[in-house]
Amino acid sequence: VPEQDMAGLEVLVTAGPTVEPIDAVRFISNYSSGKMGYALAADAAARGAAVTLVSGPVALEPPARVRVVPVKTAREMLAAAEEAAPRAAIAVFSAAVADYRPARPADRKLKKGVDDAALAAVELTPNPDILATVGAAKRPGQVVVGFAAETDDVAANARAKLASKHADMIVANQVGEGRAFGTDDDQVVLVTAAGDEELPLMPKRELAHAIWTRALEMR
Ligand code: C5P
């Protein structure tokens, strides 16, 4: 049994992609596997935390002793996160939220040869930023952690996100060339007001452990 150093703590984790309907059979989404978020939820639960895992559609088994709230769209994810956030001592936002959604999804299947104009020009509208919304509403003592997947200027972009999203820590990783999305290992920099802490390449479960340990120190 791991050390129960999160016993009595409620935590919130968002994970996976969101899916945004175009019509009754089509959607916009991304390649997020949910592995990082599920590893975070599993590690916190193993350390005794009461975990709410707000998850987009993924092909993963729910971790033991975790309350999973399944969602599809960014707006559903926002509602579930806002419901759980006030009780959370630490909230970690690892979901890959679709930045845009179809503005007017059809509730039937759009048909080739009939709805060509609508299919060729799906109008998109911005989704809410869940981390920024919860970050702006956080109360003293709550620790909010976000992720930043960047191809360039990783640490500098992450530092900008600390401020714009009212986060206490940004877990920054380099993406591209098959890194991060869908893999079992990750190499990141933990960016906080105190500075940058570069971690070595490690399995996501170990990384999850390091993220919670650092967040616990910030309380
Ligand atoms: O702005 P960017 O998408 O790079 O920020 C990534 C961080 O913000 C991640 O922690 C992600 O979960 C969160 N995010 C969010 N809602 C969005 C977009 C990003 O919670 N709509």
Image (tube, rainbow, N blue to C red):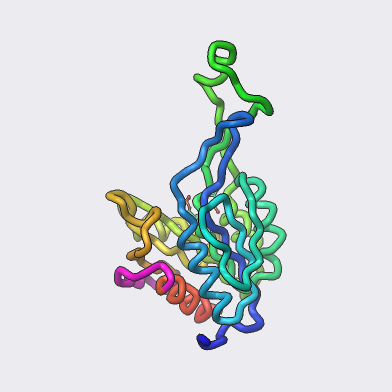
Q: In this view, does 28 lie above or below 81?
A: above
Is residue 89 shown left or right of residue 177? Answer: right
Give the residue at x 70% y 70%: 87
Give the residue at x 54% y 65%: 92
* Residue 161 located within the stretch drawn in magenta: no
Is residue 103 visible to us here?
Answer: no
Residue 7 drawn at (x, y percent): 62, 84
Give the residue at x 55% y 75%: 44
Give the residue at x 54% y 16%: 112
Q: In this view, does 19 lie above or below 216?
A: above
Residue 193 drawn at (x, y percent): 44, 70
Is residue 36 visible to us here?
Answer: yes
Q: Which of 168 and 29 is in front in this view?
A: 29
Q: Is residue 10 above or below residue 100?
A: below
Q: Which of 56 and 95 is in front in this view?
A: 56
Residue 164 drawn at (x, y percent): 51, 55
Residue 146 drawn at (x, y percent): 50, 61
Locate the C terminus and report the quarter of the image it occupies.
bottom right
Give the quarter of the image for residue 159: bottom left
Give the quarter of the image for residue 124: top right
Q: Which residue lies furthest to the left in this view?
A: 177
Q: Give the range drawn in magenta.
A: 193-205
* Residue 197 located within the stretch drawn in magenta: yes
